Image (tube, rainbow, N blue to C red):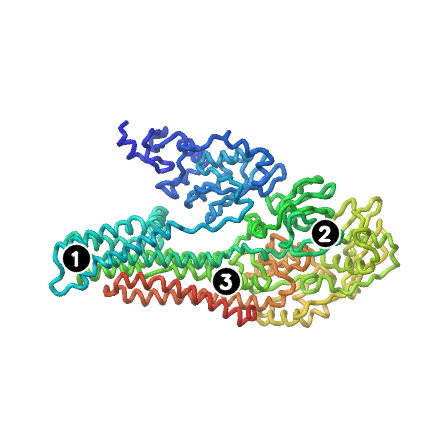
Amino acid sequence: MSAELLEKTQCTHCGEPCDEELITSASGDAHFCCHGCHTVYDLLNESGLGSFYKIDQQNPGISMRKVKQASQFSHLDDPQVMQPLLDFNDGKTARVTLRLPQIHCSSCIYLLENLHKLDSGVKSAEVFFDRREAAITFSLEALPLSGLAALLSRIGYEPDLSLDHLSTKKQRATNRPQLLKIGIAGFAFGNIMLFSLPEYLAGPGGIDAQFLKLFGGLNIILALPVFLYSALDFYKPALASIRQRQWSMDIAISLGIMAMFFRSLYEILSGMGVGYMDSFAMLVFFLLVGRLFQQKTYESLSFDRDFKSYFPLSVIRITKQGDEESVAATRIEADDKILIRNGELVPADSILLEEEAWLDYSFVTGESEPVHIQKGALVYAGGRNVKTSARFKTVKPVSSSYLTRLWNSEAFRKPKPEGLHSTSGRFSRYFSPAILGVATVSAMYWLFFGEAGLALNAFTAVLIIACPCAIALSAPFTLGWATKILGKNKIYLKNSEVTEQFAAVTSVVFDKTGTLTHRDQAKVAFAGRNLEPEENRLLISALHENTHPLGRAVYQHLQTELNQPLREYLVKPDSYREESGKGVEAVFGSHKVRLGSAAWVGVSKDAEADALASRVYVSFDGIIPGYFELQNQYRLGMSELIQSLRTRLTDSVFLLSGDNDQEKKNLLPVFGSAERLRFKQSPHDKLSFVEGLKAGKQEVLMIGDGLNDAGALRSSTVGISLAEDTSSFTPASDVIMEAGSLSLLDRVLAFSRSSVTIIYVSFAISILYNIIGLSYAVTGTLSPLICAIIMPISSISVILFTTLATHWVARKNGLTT
């Protein structure tokens, strides 16, 4: 086959010319430059991923000519090499985040997130396009790390396995190609302007024809790099949109650029004049500068919350003296000793110091089967300790960004209705064809009723001045600023869209214990016989494992009576079990201790009927010596908060409590109706109540302690987990709120609604800008150059408006000073 024919034939997989060899598929409708591309093509089609080639038909794949062999990755199975690379490894399931520099388009995302179809050993994959990374969960038994690397390399995504990024923070790379394009456009604009000055300044007689040709030729030479290189940032997305049969603003902008360039080219070559190459180059220059401004402004707001104070998880750290202190998880450093109680989260990769422990890694892998860990084993961040408390030694500091990424994992993501992001996206899609229609009608009108120059001016000006960018920026900027402002008030959102969900809330449901009440300020008294010293010791040891608000209150009460160091007093239980909504059971040798509700320890429910306070019953080996009675201390400002919410939400404010109804008489005046107060609610009852409200078309905000309320929090429109010196974090929640910020809830709802209003106002500003701009552009008298200067103003105005308005509304609601 001739070399010329080979060069003209493009590879179906990677799009490169088949200049060395030509391989044809059995059907004859696909051609490949190498056997590697042919293999990947067959592999994708056999796995049901043939649509990969429809997403980017020009060059969806990566060339396979220089792919490494599987044997070249065998070193990755060496434990010393593998360990620093993995985010998680329990011997069966592993998770790794790999940098894949070859990721370049939507087809790459499609292929990588369907990696499990190519190999069943892959469980899931999530692509982070902006970082060119993929987080992959896979089965080590079915697919070793070397096999995963070979699989990725086989389909054209050889991972960058350099360990440098594990020890040093990566510097943000500057976008050199974008700056180069701006520089070329600016250089060309300046010089073309100089060559065009003689034409502009010439008198009635004009300039000599030879100079006209000379300057025209020079202008073409200078404008070509702008047209062929600088404007690529508009052509590529426009072409991609056309291939995907979707309208985008890049199509309209590209048509405007081309119209201006070819109009100028025609005038120069026909000898009519020097054209408008200066306006063309300046147009591209200003468009690129405007796009860079939007990009840099958005990057500066970086709403993925990669800052140390973000994750409000508390951890018990063991001091050098052996004492326990509660500290923020972000203060934990490598080699710190920490105590993780039943149900608490391991905040950083650690070594187990106990003989054994059981970890639930569902937060990391999505699988809830507990894993048995032996002393000295490495435990990964995100595991939840079950059964008895355990001591760990951290091997690395807490990574708030890693925990945040787990929190946003697909496994815990709620299905949500389309919001303002999708609304603005739809508007932008419809906007582009509408503008193209207006431009075409304007051009046709001036062709028939005016002159060709006006027709081309009108067509170009309409395409350039109309811009949906401001609409597309309204929601991200407003919601992003709202997220940042709420974070400063110690109200931490899973993602910026939660602000929009806050604004839609029509009903609020409160848990009582640990939410409306302080966890550690209850007045505790024991009713029953005097406890023996050994019984007190077993009680304190059992409650040391517990994180429930009532259990912590009893523990604090008993601890104040100790006259010796806690570390010398505690007894390690042989087993520990906690039943949500019921109580705990701890076994110490031959003794069994139970604490919790009356039914849990074997007391008739009728015994609680006349209770005047919350009770925690106690039993030792089935014998009940009495119970602890707790007088709740309500948080400051709760009555005013609930009254304010009732006013805003037309009394749709409810209380769900697992306790008896002894507090009913105190809460009735606050909530206004006995129908809004529900006591003795199990976790299932709470879930059913929330789902009942949602069935009645209510948007529900649920506030709980994250322990017994996980189901209700997950089911609600917005779930808030209240954090107070315990690691009561649950992935079911959308918001983690520090307890001291609960009194701000009514202001948060008002602020969120105002934020959504700001978005709609910014929509209106952008639409008004486009209406005014188009009314001038269709006349054909507005220079495309002026349009290019005006176009970024709409985006700048929306960015300034959303920024200033969001901060003003926050100040008005008392969230900033």
812 horizontally vs 174: left or right: right
Which residue lies under the disc numbered 3?
Answer: 481
Q: CA distance from mark 2 to mark 3?
A: 38 Å
Amino acid type indicated by mark 1: Gly
Q: Secondary structure at mark 1?
A: loop
Check residue 431 in the rendering and tell me which mark sits there, or answer none.
none
Q: CA distance from mark 1 to mark 2?
A: 82 Å
Amino acid type indicated by mark 3: Trp
Check residue 273 in the rendering and tell me which mark sits there, or answer none.
1
551 horizontally vs 442: left or right: right
Q: Quadrant of the C terminus?
A: bottom right
Residue drawn at (37%, 49%) of the image: 177
Q: Secondary structure at mark 2?
A: strand
Q: CA distance from mark 3 to mark 1?
A: 50 Å
Which residue lies under the disc numbered 2?
Answer: 318
Question: Between disc 2 and disc 3, whose residue precedes?
Answer: 2
